[in-house]
Image (cartoon, rainbow, N blue to C red):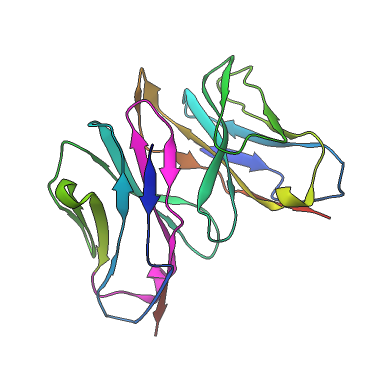
Amino acid sequence: AQKVTQAQTEISVVEKEDVTLDCVYETRDTTYYLFWYKQPPSGELVFLIRRNSFDEQNEISGRYSWNFQKSTSSFNFTITASQVVDSAVYFCALMDYGQNFVFGPGTRLSVLP
Amino acid sequence: NAGVTQTPKFQVLKTGQSMTLQCAQDMNHEYMSWYRQDPGMGLRLIHYSVGAGITDQGEVPNGYNVSRSTTEDFPLRLLSAAPSQTSVYFCASSYSRGRFRDEQYFGPGTRLTVT
């Protein structure tokens, strides 16, 4: 069965601090995809990244970076030099090949000025 | 492209009433799905469809019906609303080919309150 755990319910940081959001997943499949979505206070869900299980290279996009480690079943998300606009709920999701998405419970990030 | 659209944005129902939440996408995506979002529980899958004429149940299907007569539309019907169905509902779609599915694109959501 698929499962996604985001152990951090809420995180609060001061602007310009770095912050890492943890995501641990469970799956029996060897082919799967991992995703991160952002839900700002306005409520929409914004796609951030997709990773497949065969690509363990870390990815960087501006201030965002993702660390995928199959050995620990983790797909962590780091925001460098956080900004107030990064305040949102962040969801990690898992999709086994041919199956449906399973979302984690989300981590609420508050970036204080 | 409008992407994924949902109507209405807000709705208040009385217990026992029925209604349909509308969802449409203009990206020619085969895969469409409905989720509900409740505090602290992430998004839970209600129903999904892998193409016109094909629907299936997700994690929390009770009390909801769906149909998919066209690629574009995927309405969600509440048969007899209950207070436990108070939630935010999201529709999503994604490109799919065989068993492969791409990332999902979400509509803006419908906030439903059942009194």
Q: Quadrant of the N terminus of chain A?
A: top left
Q: Position of residue B55 (x, y in %)?
A: 58, 21
Question: Does A88 lie within the magenta span?
Answer: yes
Q: Is residue B81 above or below residue A20?
A: above
The quadrant of the rendering that contains the C terminus of chain A is bottom left
**Residue at 63% of width from left, 41% of height from top?**
B6
Residue A73 drawn above or below residue B63 = below
- Indicate left or right for B91 with B94 as reference: right
Q: Is residue A30 left or right of residue A88?
A: left
Q: Note whether residue B77 is visible.
A: yes
Residue at horizontal 24 percent and vertical 31 percent from the top: A31
Residue placed furthest toward the top: B53
* Residue A109 belongs to the span the image colors magenta: no
Taking depth in this image into account, of A67 and B28 the one nearest to the observer is A67
| Front position in the image: A72 or B108 | A72
What span is in magenta?
A: A80-108
Residue A71 drawn above or below residue A107:
above
Residue A38, percent across and down?
A: 42, 57
Residue in view at x 35 percent, y 42 percent: A94
Residue A22 point in image, percent of width and height: 30, 61
